[in-house]
Image: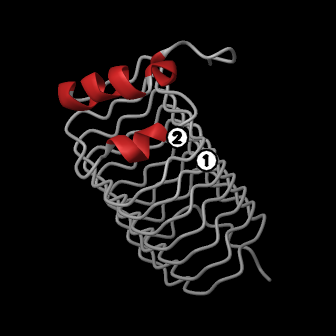
Amino acid sequence: MNIPTKKDLRGANLELADLRRANLNGTDLRGANLEGANLVEVNLEEANLEGANLKKTGLLAANLKKSNLRKANFEGAYLIRTNLEEANLEGANFEGACFIEANLNGVDLRGANLQEANFGGANLVNADLQETNLKRASFKEANLARTNLIRAKHLSLNQLSKAKTLYETKLDEKLLISLREKYPALLEEPDDAD
C-alpha cells in the first residue's frame, strides 16, 4: 500500500483504507472520511482531524498525542491502548467507542458524547469531561484521578464505584457525598498516584 506523504489531506476520502503503521504526524485531515479505516499503530501525533469521520475505525495502539479531534465522529471506534494524551476531543462523538487501556491523560472531552463508551483500565488523569454524556459508559478499573466530571450527564454512583481511583476528582456535590459514604477508599490517594 502506498502511504500518503502529503501533509494536506483535508476532506480526503480514505474510507476502509489500510494505513497501518503510517506516519501521518502533523497531517491536516480536517473533514476527511476515514470510516472503517485500519489505523493500527498509526502515528497521528499533532494531526488535525477536526470534524473527520472515524466511525468504526481500528486505532489500536495508535498515537494521537496532542491531536485536534474536535467534533470528530468516532462512533463505534476501537481505541484500545491508543495514546490520546493532551488531545482536543471537545464535542466529539465517541458513542460505543472502546478505550480499553487507552492513555487519555490531560485530554479535553468537554461536551463529548461518550454514551456506552468503554474506558476499562484507561488512564484519564487530569482529563476534562465536563458536560459529557456518560450514559451507560463503563469506567471499570479506570484511573480517574484529578479528572473533571462536573456537570457530566447520566453519571451514576454505580459507574464511579467501578473505577480504580477517584483521587482529587472534581464531581458534583451530590455524587461526592454519596461516594464519601459508600466508597471512601476510592477518594484516597492511591499507592501508584501519577
Q: Is residue 66 visible?
A: yes
- The answer to whether mark 2 and mark 1 are in CB contact below 8 A is yes
Horizontally, is 156 left or right of 121 in the view?
A: left
Q: List x then y, in percent, for residue 20.
A: 76, 70
Residue at image position (39%, 28%) is: 182
Residue at image position (31%, 59%) is: 135
Sequence order check, earlier mark of 2 and 1 = 1
Alpha-carbon distance for marks 2 and 1? 6 Å
Q: Is residue 110 above or below residue 105?
A: below
**Pointer 1: residues within 10 angstroms few (<14), some, or many (20+)?**
many
Q: Nearer the viewer, residue 144 or 81?
A: 144
Could you tell me which quadrant the N terminus lies in? bottom right
Q: List x then y, in percent, for residue 153.
A: 22, 49
Q: Is residue 41 above or below residue 75?
A: above
Give the numbered dot on residue 15: none
Q: List x then y, in percent, for residue 93.
A: 35, 64
SS at mark 1 in the image: loop
**Circle 1 sits on which residue?**
45
SS at mark 2 in the image: loop
The residue most toward the front is 182
**Pointer 2: residues within 10 angstroms few (<14), some, or many (20+)?**
many
Q: Quadrant of residue 88?
A: top left
Q: Quadrant of residue 21?
A: bottom right
Q: Of the residues shown, which amino acid type is indicated by label 2?
A: Lys
Q: Is residue 105 above or below residue 16?
A: above
Give the numbered dot on residue 66: 2
Q: Of the residues shown, which amino acid type is indicated by label 1?
A: Glu
Residue at image position (72%, 56%) is: 61
Horizontally, is 31 left or right of 186 in the view?
A: left
Q: How many labels were placed on the picture?
A: 2
Residue at image position (41%, 47%) is: 159
Q: Is residue 150 above or below residue 29?
A: above
